Image: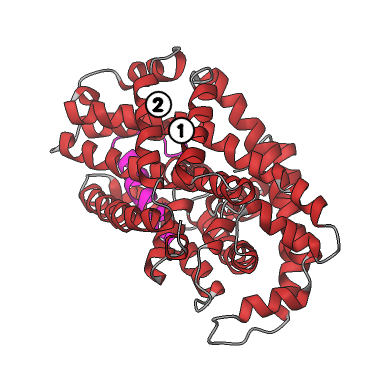
Amino acid sequence: MDNSEKKFQSKLGFILSCVGSAVGMANIWAFPYRVGKYGGAVFLLIYFMFIALFSYVGLSAEYLIGRRAGTGTLGSYEYAWNEKGKGKLGYTLAYIPLLGSMSIAIGYAIISAWVLRTFGAAVTGKILEVDTAQFFGEAVQGNFVILPWHIAVIVITLLTLFAGASSIEKTNKIMMPAFFILFFILAVRVAFLPGAIEGYKYLFVPDWSYLFNVETWVNAMGQAFFSLSITGSGMIVCGAYLDKKEDIVNGALQTGIFDTLAAMIAAFVVIPASYAFGYPAGAGPSLMFMTIPAIFKQMPFGHVLAILFFISVVFAAVSSLQNMFEVVGESIITRFKMSRKTVIFLLAIVSLVIGIFIEPENKVGPWMDVVTIYIIPFGAVLGAISWYWILKKESFMEELNEGSKVKRSEAYFTVGRYVYVPLVIVVFVLGLIYHGIG
Protein backbone atom coordinates (compact mmCIF):
# COMPACT_ATOMS: atom_id res chain seq x y z
CA MET A 1 0.00 0.00 0.00
CA ASP A 2 1.52 3.38 -0.92
CA ASN A 3 1.57 6.28 1.53
CA SER A 4 -1.44 8.03 -0.01
CA GLU A 5 -3.59 5.01 0.72
CA LYS A 6 -2.58 5.21 4.38
CA LYS A 7 -3.72 8.81 4.82
CA PHE A 8 -7.11 10.45 4.79
CA GLN A 9 -7.36 12.69 1.75
CA SER A 10 -9.31 15.49 3.46
CA LYS A 11 -10.31 16.83 6.87
CA LEU A 12 -13.94 16.05 6.08
CA GLY A 13 -13.04 12.48 5.19
CA PHE A 14 -11.17 12.11 8.48
CA ILE A 15 -14.07 13.49 10.52
CA LEU A 16 -16.71 11.39 8.75
CA SER A 17 -14.58 8.26 9.09
CA CYS A 18 -14.04 8.89 12.81
CA VAL A 19 -17.73 9.66 13.27
CA GLY A 20 -18.54 6.47 11.40
CA SER A 21 -16.30 4.57 13.80
CA ALA A 22 -17.94 6.16 16.85
CA VAL A 23 -21.57 6.16 15.70
CA GLY A 24 -23.14 2.78 16.22
CA MET A 25 -25.46 0.85 18.48
CA ALA A 26 -24.41 2.96 21.46
CA ASN A 27 -26.02 5.96 19.75
CA ILE A 28 -29.08 4.34 18.21
CA TRP A 29 -29.82 1.43 20.50
CA ALA A 30 -28.57 2.44 23.95
CA PHE A 31 -28.75 6.24 23.99
CA PRO A 32 -32.51 6.70 23.50
CA TYR A 33 -33.51 4.20 26.18
CA ARG A 34 -30.91 5.53 28.65
CA VAL A 35 -32.20 9.06 28.11
CA GLY A 36 -35.68 7.68 28.69
CA LYS A 37 -34.73 5.73 31.79
CA TYR A 38 -32.34 8.06 33.58
CA GLY A 39 -33.88 11.49 33.57
CA GLY A 40 -34.41 12.93 30.09
CA ALA A 41 -33.16 16.51 30.04
CA VAL A 42 -31.02 16.14 33.17
CA PHE A 43 -29.31 13.07 31.72
CA LEU A 44 -28.57 15.07 28.57
CA LEU A 45 -26.95 17.94 30.46
CA ILE A 46 -24.62 15.56 32.30
CA TYR A 47 -23.96 13.60 29.11
CA PHE A 48 -22.97 16.76 27.20
CA MET A 49 -20.50 17.68 29.94
CA PHE A 50 -18.78 14.29 29.78
CA ILE A 51 -18.79 14.21 25.97
CA ALA A 52 -16.99 17.57 25.90
CA LEU A 53 -14.38 16.43 28.42
CA PHE A 54 -13.79 12.99 26.90
CA SER A 55 -13.54 14.42 23.37
CA TYR A 56 -11.17 17.19 24.45
CA VAL A 57 -8.58 15.17 26.38
CA GLY A 58 -9.49 11.51 25.75
CA LEU A 59 -10.31 11.10 22.08
CA SER A 60 -7.66 13.62 21.04
CA ALA A 61 -5.00 11.66 22.97
CA GLU A 62 -5.77 8.53 20.92
CA TYR A 63 -5.56 10.52 17.69
CA LEU A 64 -2.33 12.05 18.96
CA ILE A 65 -0.47 8.85 19.78
CA GLY A 66 -1.55 7.25 16.50
CA ARG A 67 -0.21 10.16 14.48
CA ARG A 68 2.93 10.46 16.63
CA ALA A 69 3.82 6.79 16.24
CA GLY A 70 2.59 6.67 12.65
CA THR A 71 0.86 3.36 13.28
CA GLY A 72 -1.92 1.64 15.21
CA THR A 73 -2.29 -0.04 18.59
CA LEU A 74 0.83 -2.24 18.87
CA GLY A 75 3.23 0.35 17.53
CA SER A 76 1.68 3.20 19.52
CA TYR A 77 2.01 1.49 22.89
CA GLU A 78 5.53 0.41 22.01
CA TYR A 79 6.38 4.00 21.08
CA ALA A 80 4.95 5.48 24.28
CA TRP A 81 6.59 2.95 26.60
CA ASN A 82 9.87 3.10 24.71
CA GLU A 83 10.30 6.62 26.07
CA LYS A 84 10.65 4.95 29.47
CA GLY A 85 12.96 2.31 28.02
CA LYS A 86 10.24 -0.35 28.20
CA GLY A 87 9.06 -0.64 24.62
CA LYS A 88 8.68 -4.42 24.77
CA LEU A 89 6.41 -4.14 27.82
CA GLY A 90 4.27 -1.56 26.02
CA TYR A 91 4.08 -3.79 22.96
CA THR A 92 2.95 -6.73 25.13
CA LEU A 93 0.35 -4.66 27.01
CA ALA A 94 -1.06 -3.44 23.69
CA TYR A 95 -2.45 -6.88 22.95
CA ILE A 96 -5.07 -6.38 25.71
CA PRO A 97 -6.90 -3.45 24.04
CA LEU A 98 -6.29 -5.08 20.66
CA LEU A 99 -7.98 -8.23 21.95
CA GLY A 100 -10.85 -6.02 23.09
CA SER A 101 -11.26 -4.58 19.60
CA MET A 102 -11.31 -8.03 18.00
CA SER A 103 -13.66 -9.47 20.61
CA ILE A 104 -16.12 -6.59 20.30
CA ALA A 105 -16.02 -6.98 16.51
CA ILE A 106 -17.09 -10.62 16.84
CA GLY A 107 -20.11 -9.72 18.96
CA TYR A 108 -20.88 -6.55 17.04
CA ALA A 109 -21.07 -8.48 13.77
CA ILE A 110 -23.85 -10.59 15.33
CA ILE A 111 -25.82 -7.52 16.43
CA SER A 112 -25.29 -6.03 12.97
CA ALA A 113 -26.69 -9.24 11.47
CA TRP A 114 -29.84 -8.78 13.58
CA VAL A 115 -30.12 -5.28 12.12
CA LEU A 116 -29.54 -6.45 8.54
CA ARG A 117 -32.14 -9.21 8.95
CA THR A 118 -34.65 -6.65 10.21
CA PHE A 119 -33.81 -4.36 7.28
CA GLY A 120 -34.47 -7.27 4.91
CA ALA A 121 -37.84 -7.81 6.56
CA ALA A 122 -38.56 -4.09 6.24
CA VAL A 123 -37.85 -4.18 2.50
CA THR A 124 -40.23 -7.10 1.94
CA GLY A 125 -42.80 -5.63 4.34
CA LYS A 126 -42.66 -8.70 6.57
CA ILE A 127 -41.69 -6.66 9.62
CA LEU A 128 -45.03 -4.84 9.38
CA GLU A 129 -47.04 -8.05 9.11
CA VAL A 130 -45.63 -10.30 11.84
CA ASP A 131 -45.47 -10.09 15.60
CA THR A 132 -42.27 -8.10 16.14
CA ALA A 133 -41.48 -9.74 19.47
CA GLN A 134 -41.70 -13.17 17.84
CA PHE A 135 -39.64 -12.02 14.84
CA PHE A 136 -36.92 -10.66 17.08
CA GLY A 137 -37.10 -13.71 19.32
CA GLU A 138 -36.41 -16.03 16.38
CA ALA A 139 -33.23 -14.11 15.59
CA VAL A 140 -31.81 -13.98 19.10
CA GLN A 141 -32.83 -17.39 20.43
CA GLY A 142 -32.18 -19.87 17.64
CA ASN A 143 -28.92 -21.36 16.41
CA PHE A 144 -27.82 -20.34 12.88
CA VAL A 145 -31.05 -18.38 12.24
CA ILE A 146 -29.10 -15.28 11.27
CA LEU A 147 -26.20 -17.07 9.57
CA PRO A 148 -26.91 -15.75 6.02
CA TRP A 149 -27.21 -12.21 7.41
CA HIS A 150 -24.11 -12.73 9.54
CA ILE A 151 -22.11 -13.73 6.47
CA ALA A 152 -23.53 -10.78 4.52
CA VAL A 153 -22.45 -8.29 7.19
CA ILE A 154 -18.91 -9.66 7.18
CA VAL A 155 -18.72 -9.59 3.37
CA ILE A 156 -20.07 -6.03 3.13
CA THR A 157 -17.55 -4.84 5.71
CA LEU A 158 -14.71 -6.65 3.92
CA LEU A 159 -15.52 -4.94 0.64
CA THR A 160 -15.28 -1.52 2.29
CA LEU A 161 -11.89 -2.31 3.83
CA PHE A 162 -9.79 -3.86 1.09
CA ALA A 163 -8.52 -0.60 -0.39
CA GLY A 164 -7.29 0.89 2.90
CA ALA A 165 -7.91 4.31 4.45
CA SER A 166 -8.98 5.80 1.12
CA SER A 167 -11.74 3.21 0.85
CA ILE A 168 -12.91 3.78 4.43
CA GLU A 169 -12.99 7.51 3.74
CA LYS A 170 -15.00 7.08 0.53
CA THR A 171 -17.59 4.74 2.04
CA ASN A 172 -18.08 6.94 5.10
CA LYS A 173 -18.53 9.99 2.90
CA ILE A 174 -21.62 8.18 1.62
CA MET A 175 -22.82 6.28 4.68
CA MET A 176 -22.56 9.01 7.32
CA PRO A 177 -24.36 11.81 5.41
CA ALA A 178 -27.00 9.24 4.41
CA PHE A 179 -27.40 8.23 8.05
CA PHE A 180 -28.00 11.82 9.17
CA ILE A 181 -30.35 12.63 6.27
CA LEU A 182 -32.46 9.50 6.72
CA PHE A 183 -32.77 9.94 10.47
CA PHE A 184 -33.63 13.62 9.98
CA ILE A 185 -36.48 12.64 7.63
CA LEU A 186 -37.76 10.22 10.27
CA ALA A 187 -37.45 12.80 13.03
CA VAL A 188 -39.50 15.29 11.03
CA ARG A 189 -42.20 12.68 10.38
CA VAL A 190 -42.34 11.66 14.04
CA ALA A 191 -42.73 15.32 15.08
CA PHE A 192 -46.21 15.38 13.50
CA LEU A 193 -47.48 12.35 15.42
CA PRO A 194 -50.25 13.05 17.96
CA GLY A 195 -48.74 12.82 21.43
CA ALA A 196 -45.13 13.24 20.27
CA ILE A 197 -44.96 16.55 22.14
CA GLU A 198 -44.79 14.64 25.43
CA GLY A 199 -41.59 12.99 24.25
CA TYR A 200 -40.03 16.37 23.50
CA LYS A 201 -41.07 17.63 26.93
CA TYR A 202 -39.35 14.65 28.49
CA LEU A 203 -36.21 15.43 26.51
CA PHE A 204 -36.11 19.16 27.19
CA VAL A 205 -37.94 19.89 30.47
CA PRO A 206 -35.60 18.95 33.34
CA ASP A 207 -36.79 16.92 36.30
CA TRP A 208 -34.10 18.11 38.69
CA SER A 209 -34.65 15.22 41.09
CA TYR A 210 -32.60 13.10 38.68
CA LEU A 211 -29.64 15.40 39.33
CA PHE A 212 -29.28 13.74 42.73
CA ASN A 213 -29.63 10.22 41.36
CA VAL A 214 -26.22 8.52 41.27
CA GLU A 215 -27.30 6.21 38.45
CA THR A 216 -28.04 9.18 36.21
CA TRP A 217 -24.43 10.34 36.53
CA VAL A 218 -22.99 6.85 36.23
CA ASN A 219 -24.92 6.00 33.06
CA ALA A 220 -24.39 9.42 31.45
CA MET A 221 -20.64 9.12 31.99
CA GLY A 222 -20.53 5.53 30.74
CA GLN A 223 -22.66 6.34 27.71
CA ALA A 224 -20.43 9.28 26.77
CA PHE A 225 -17.23 7.32 27.23
CA PHE A 226 -18.21 4.25 25.24
CA SER A 227 -20.05 6.23 22.58
CA LEU A 228 -16.76 7.89 21.57
CA SER A 229 -15.01 4.48 21.35
CA ILE A 230 -12.13 5.58 23.58
CA THR A 231 -10.96 2.05 24.17
CA GLY A 232 -7.21 2.46 24.28
CA SER A 233 -7.20 1.04 20.76
CA GLY A 234 -10.24 1.93 18.65
CA MET A 235 -9.41 5.48 17.58
CA ILE A 236 -5.61 5.22 17.45
CA VAL A 237 -5.68 4.02 13.86
CA CYS A 238 -7.68 7.11 12.83
CA GLY A 239 -4.83 9.23 14.17
CA ALA A 240 -2.30 7.10 12.31
CA TYR A 241 -4.01 8.06 9.06
CA LEU A 242 -4.25 11.79 9.97
CA ASP A 243 -2.09 14.33 8.16
CA LYS A 244 0.38 16.36 10.23
CA LYS A 245 -1.20 19.63 9.08
CA GLU A 246 -4.50 18.88 10.83
CA ASP A 247 -5.47 20.13 14.29
CA ILE A 248 -5.94 17.06 16.52
CA VAL A 249 -8.04 18.69 19.23
CA ASN A 250 -10.30 20.38 16.71
CA GLY A 251 -10.81 17.03 14.95
CA ALA A 252 -11.63 15.30 18.25
CA LEU A 253 -14.14 17.96 19.25
CA GLN A 254 -15.84 17.80 15.84
CA THR A 255 -16.05 14.02 16.12
CA GLY A 256 -17.67 14.42 19.54
CA ILE A 257 -20.16 16.96 18.20
CA PHE A 258 -21.26 14.80 15.27
CA ASP A 259 -21.38 11.69 17.44
CA THR A 260 -23.67 13.55 19.85
CA LEU A 261 -25.83 14.82 16.99
CA ALA A 262 -26.27 11.23 15.81
CA ALA A 263 -27.35 10.16 19.29
CA MET A 264 -29.70 13.12 19.66
CA ILE A 265 -31.39 12.65 16.32
CA ALA A 266 -31.91 8.97 17.20
CA ALA A 267 -33.51 10.09 20.47
CA PHE A 268 -35.71 12.56 18.53
CA VAL A 269 -37.04 9.62 16.52
CA VAL A 270 -37.38 6.98 19.22
CA ILE A 271 -38.61 8.83 22.32
CA PRO A 272 -41.35 11.05 20.80
CA ALA A 273 -42.54 8.05 18.76
CA SER A 274 -42.66 5.87 21.87
CA TYR A 275 -44.77 8.49 23.67
CA ALA A 276 -47.05 8.90 20.65
CA PHE A 277 -47.89 5.19 20.65
CA GLY A 278 -47.84 4.55 24.36
CA TYR A 279 -44.59 2.59 24.64
CA PRO A 280 -42.33 3.17 27.66
CA ALA A 281 -39.33 5.29 26.67
CA GLY A 282 -37.12 3.44 29.13
CA ALA A 283 -38.06 0.00 27.84
CA GLY A 284 -34.47 -1.07 27.30
CA PRO A 285 -32.47 -2.29 24.28
CA SER A 286 -35.53 -4.01 22.82
CA LEU A 287 -36.90 -0.54 22.05
CA MET A 288 -35.23 -0.50 18.64
CA PHE A 289 -35.86 -4.05 17.47
CA MET A 290 -39.39 -4.56 18.79
CA THR A 291 -40.96 -1.21 19.62
CA ILE A 292 -39.91 0.74 16.53
CA PRO A 293 -41.31 -1.78 13.99
CA ALA A 294 -44.53 -1.86 15.99
CA ILE A 295 -44.69 1.92 15.73
CA PHE A 296 -44.13 1.84 11.98
CA LYS A 297 -47.05 -0.55 11.64
CA GLN A 298 -49.36 2.17 12.89
CA MET A 299 -47.93 5.02 10.85
CA PRO A 300 -48.88 6.24 7.38
CA PHE A 301 -46.09 5.31 4.93
CA GLY A 302 -44.82 2.95 7.64
CA HIS A 303 -43.27 0.59 5.08
CA VAL A 304 -41.09 3.31 3.54
CA LEU A 305 -40.16 4.74 6.94
CA ALA A 306 -39.19 1.31 8.27
CA ILE A 307 -36.86 0.81 5.29
CA LEU A 308 -35.29 4.24 5.85
CA PHE A 309 -34.85 3.60 9.56
CA PHE A 310 -33.16 0.23 9.28
CA ILE A 311 -30.92 1.10 6.33
CA SER A 312 -29.69 4.01 8.47
CA VAL A 313 -28.91 1.62 11.31
CA VAL A 314 -27.16 -0.75 8.88
CA PHE A 315 -24.94 2.14 7.74
CA ALA A 316 -24.04 2.95 11.34
CA ALA A 317 -23.35 -0.70 12.16
CA VAL A 318 -21.10 -1.33 9.14
CA SER A 319 -19.13 1.90 9.65
CA SER A 320 -18.36 0.90 13.25
CA LEU A 321 -17.46 -2.66 12.27
CA GLN A 322 -15.06 -1.22 9.67
CA ASN A 323 -13.12 0.47 12.43
CA MET A 324 -12.94 -2.63 14.63
CA PHE A 325 -11.46 -4.74 11.83
CA GLU A 326 -9.18 -1.91 10.72
CA VAL A 327 -7.75 -1.47 14.23
CA VAL A 328 -6.69 -5.10 14.47
CA GLY A 329 -5.77 -5.45 10.83
CA GLU A 330 -3.47 -2.41 10.72
CA SER A 331 -1.45 -3.64 13.70
CA ILE A 332 -0.97 -7.11 12.24
CA ILE A 333 -0.14 -5.77 8.76
CA THR A 334 2.45 -3.34 10.14
CA ARG A 335 4.00 -5.75 12.63
CA PHE A 336 4.13 -8.92 10.56
CA LYS A 337 4.43 -7.38 7.06
CA MET A 338 1.51 -9.37 5.68
CA SER A 339 -0.66 -8.22 2.77
CA ARG A 340 -3.68 -6.16 3.68
CA LYS A 341 -6.22 -8.32 1.87
CA THR A 342 -4.89 -11.49 3.48
CA VAL A 343 -5.05 -10.06 6.99
CA ILE A 344 -8.51 -8.54 6.62
CA PHE A 345 -9.82 -11.77 5.10
CA LEU A 346 -8.35 -13.87 7.93
CA LEU A 347 -9.86 -11.56 10.56
CA ALA A 348 -13.23 -11.91 8.88
CA ILE A 349 -12.95 -15.70 8.91
CA VAL A 350 -11.97 -15.71 12.60
CA SER A 351 -14.86 -13.39 13.43
CA LEU A 352 -17.35 -15.55 11.56
CA VAL A 353 -16.07 -18.93 12.81
CA ILE A 354 -16.28 -17.83 16.45
CA GLY A 355 -19.39 -15.75 15.94
CA ILE A 356 -21.61 -18.46 14.45
CA PHE A 357 -21.39 -20.42 17.69
CA ILE A 358 -22.49 -17.51 19.88
CA GLU A 359 -25.28 -16.07 17.72
CA PRO A 360 -28.13 -16.66 20.22
CA GLU A 361 -28.64 -13.86 22.74
CA ASN A 362 -27.92 -16.11 25.71
CA LYS A 363 -24.42 -16.67 24.30
CA VAL A 364 -23.51 -13.36 22.68
CA GLY A 365 -24.85 -11.48 25.73
CA PRO A 366 -22.32 -12.99 28.17
CA TRP A 367 -19.60 -12.63 25.50
CA MET A 368 -20.29 -8.90 25.15
CA ASP A 369 -20.51 -8.51 28.94
CA VAL A 370 -16.99 -9.88 29.38
CA VAL A 371 -15.69 -7.64 26.61
CA THR A 372 -17.43 -4.43 27.66
CA ILE A 373 -17.14 -4.84 31.44
CA TYR A 374 -13.60 -6.20 31.70
CA ILE A 375 -11.44 -6.16 28.56
CA ILE A 376 -12.30 -2.85 26.88
CA PRO A 377 -12.46 -0.67 30.04
CA PHE A 378 -9.18 -2.17 31.26
CA GLY A 379 -7.65 -1.48 27.85
CA ALA A 380 -8.91 2.10 28.10
CA VAL A 381 -7.17 2.46 31.47
CA LEU A 382 -3.93 1.14 29.97
CA GLY A 383 -4.26 3.61 27.12
CA ALA A 384 -4.99 6.64 29.30
CA ILE A 385 -2.04 5.86 31.59
CA SER A 386 0.24 5.24 28.61
CA TRP A 387 -0.57 8.57 26.93
CA TYR A 388 -0.60 10.78 30.03
CA TRP A 389 1.85 9.10 32.42
CA ILE A 390 4.27 7.08 30.26
CA LEU A 391 4.65 9.14 27.09
CA LYS A 392 6.86 12.15 27.80
CA LYS A 393 4.98 15.40 28.27
CA GLU A 394 7.30 17.10 25.77
CA SER A 395 6.49 14.54 23.08
CA PHE A 396 2.78 14.80 23.85
CA MET A 397 2.68 18.61 23.67
CA GLU A 398 4.83 18.76 20.54
CA GLU A 399 2.45 16.45 18.68
CA LEU A 400 -0.63 18.16 20.12
CA ASN A 401 0.46 21.53 18.74
CA GLU A 402 1.53 20.10 15.37
CA GLY A 403 -0.96 21.50 12.86
CA SER A 404 -2.77 23.53 15.52
CA LYS A 405 -3.49 27.19 14.78
CA VAL A 406 -3.69 27.90 18.50
CA LYS A 407 -0.78 26.90 20.72
CA ARG A 408 -2.16 24.87 23.63
CA SER A 409 -0.61 25.24 27.05
CA GLU A 410 0.47 22.50 29.42
CA ALA A 411 -2.84 23.00 31.26
CA TYR A 412 -4.30 20.67 28.63
CA PHE A 413 -1.90 17.92 29.64
CA THR A 414 -2.61 18.58 33.32
CA VAL A 415 -6.37 18.10 32.79
CA GLY A 416 -5.69 14.87 30.92
CA ARG A 417 -3.38 13.48 33.57
CA TYR A 418 -5.25 14.51 36.72
CA VAL A 419 -8.90 14.56 35.57
CA TYR A 420 -9.28 12.27 32.55
CA VAL A 421 -7.07 9.39 33.73
CA PRO A 422 -8.83 9.12 37.15
CA LEU A 423 -12.22 9.24 35.41
CA VAL A 424 -11.24 6.37 33.11
CA ILE A 425 -10.32 4.34 36.19
CA VAL A 426 -13.68 5.29 37.72
CA VAL A 427 -15.46 4.10 34.55
CA PHE A 428 -13.66 0.76 34.84
CA VAL A 429 -14.47 0.33 38.56
CA LEU A 430 -18.11 1.42 38.17
CA GLY A 431 -18.48 -1.02 35.28
CA LEU A 432 -17.41 -3.82 37.60
CA ILE A 433 -19.79 -2.64 40.32
CA TYR A 434 -22.80 -2.09 38.05
CA HIS A 435 -21.98 -4.99 35.68
CA GLY A 436 -21.56 -2.60 32.78
CA ILE A 437 -22.29 1.09 32.24
CA GLY A 438 -21.50 1.43 28.53
Residue 264 magenta-highlighted: yes
Which residue is tagged 2?
A: 150
Mark 2 Cα within 10 Å, few/some/many (few <14, many 20+)?
many
Circle 2 — which element?
helix
* 81 to the left or right of 38: right
The residue furthest bottom is: 406
Q: Nearer the viewer, residue 254 or 400?
A: 400
Snapshot quadrant of residue 302: top left
Residue 196 position in % (x across, y down) = 29, 47
- Tags 1 and 2 in contact by the CB under 8 Å rule? yes
Q: Can you name the residue that lies furthest to the right here?
A: 85
Cα–Cα gap, marks 1 and 2: 7 Å
State the residue at coordinates (49%, 18%).
360
> Quick check: 204 left or right of 129?
right
Question: Does the magenta-highlighted stretch encompass residue 62?
Answer: no
Does residue 181 sit above or below 155 in this rendering?
below
Q: Amino acid at mark 1?
A: Ala
What kind of secondary structure does the magenta stretch mostly adopt? helix
Amino acid at pointer 2: His
Residue position for label 1: 109
Query: Is residue 284 something one can see in this rendering?
Result: no
Q: Secondary structure at mark 1?
A: helix
| Res 126 quadrant in image | top left
* Dot placed on the residue nearer the N-terminal end, 1 or 2: 1
- Residue 149 position in % (x across, y down): 35, 25
